[in-house]
Structures are given as C-alpha cells and as structure tokens.
Image: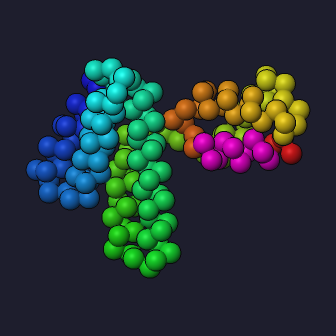
Amino acid sequence: MSLITIIDQDIKKAMLAKQEARLRGLRAIKSALLLARTEKGAADEVSGEAEIKVLQRLVKQRKESADIYKTQNRQDLYQIEIEEQQVIEEYLPKQMDRAGVESYLKELIGRVGAKSVKDMGKVMGAANKELAGKADGKTISEVVKQLLA
C-alpha cells in the first residue's frame, strides 16, 4: 500500500477522532506528496525513496520554523510546528542515533579508504546513499568531519 493511501486513511481517522494537530500534519504530508507527484518529469507514483526525501524536507522545515518561533518567543506557533513535526516523523523510518551513525561511518571510512578531511566528499557521497532516511545529513556531516579530523 502506498504512503498516500495510508495517509488518506489516517486523515479519515484523525477527522473522526477530532485530532486537530494530527490532521494538520497529515494534510501537510498529503499536500507535499501530491506536489511531488505532479512535478515536471515525475512519474505517476512517487517512489519510496522520494517519499522519504519529501518527509525529511517537511521535518526540516518544521524544525527550522520552530527554532525561529522559539527565538521570537512565540510559544503558540512553536507548539504547532512541533506537533506537526512529530506527526510527520511517525511516517519516516526509525532514525539512527549518533552512536550508531558514528560506528557505521567508521566502518564506511575504512571501506572507502579515506585518510583526511580531503576525502570527505567520497565518504559523504557513500554515506548519504546508504543512510538515506535513516540519519540526518547534518549529523552525518558532523560525524564525518570529527572522524576525519
């Protein structure tokens, strides 16, 4: 079953249960997936990999907005962004913790044969492909810099 079908079913459940925050998050996901489906050059169905990228982008947007609202002392808007972020994260694969990313990257650096920060591009390319959806790109980048320094 495709993600958009699952989202449609969950929207119906959220509407019946009158869960406002969940409904906002689900509608944001559905909207983003429909946009991805209708983009120029896109196929009729969005691939699983593309769905994960869309969800990650939505989570990143919510985090950035929440940070802005927090610095501006807008607790009401901050709370809305956090609630939507939590709903969106439910549909992402389980994220690896920093220790898991670090141990995986140590093994990857050995495989790629990276010796210094100059080889960061090789490591990042392979890591982003292999850890797509499982770890945040920012975390991967920080760990790679730390390990190659």
The magenta stretch spans residue 12: no
Quadrant containing the N terminus is top left
- Residue that lies at the very extreme toward the left in this rendered image: 16
Vertically, is 69 above or below 31?
Answer: below
- Residue at 33% of width from left, 31% of height from top? 39
Q: Can you tell which quarter of the image residue 33 is in?
A: top left
The scheme the figure's colours follow is: rainbow
- Residue at 45% of width from left, 36% of height from top? 53
- Residue that lies at the very extreme toward the right in this rendered image: 115
Does the magenta stretch mainly form a helix, a strand or a loop?
helix
Quadrant containing the C terminus is top right
Q: Can you tell which quarter of the image residue 13 is in?
A: top left
**Looking at the image, which is closer to me, 147 or 65?**
65
Residue 138 in sight here: yes
Residue 106 in sight here: no
- The reply, left or right, for residue 31 in relation to residue 73 is left
Q: How many marks?
A: 0
List x then y, in percent, for residue 55. Answer: 41, 41
**Looking at the image, which is closer to me, 147 or 57?**
57
- The reply, left or right, for residue 55 in relation to residue 129 is left
- Residue at 49% of width from left, 39% of height from top? 94
List x then y, in percent, for residue 90. Answer: 38, 44
- Residue that lies at the very extreme toward the bottom in this rendered image: 73
List x then y, in percent, for residue 24. Answer: 25, 54
Q: Which residues are magenta?
A: 137-146
Q: Can you tell which quarter of the image residue 111 is in?
A: top right
- Residue at 69% of width from left, 34% of height from top? 124
**Looking at the image, which is closer to me, 104 or 8?**
8
Vertically, is 1 above or below 74?
Answer: above
List x then y, in percent, for residue 43. Answer: 33, 20
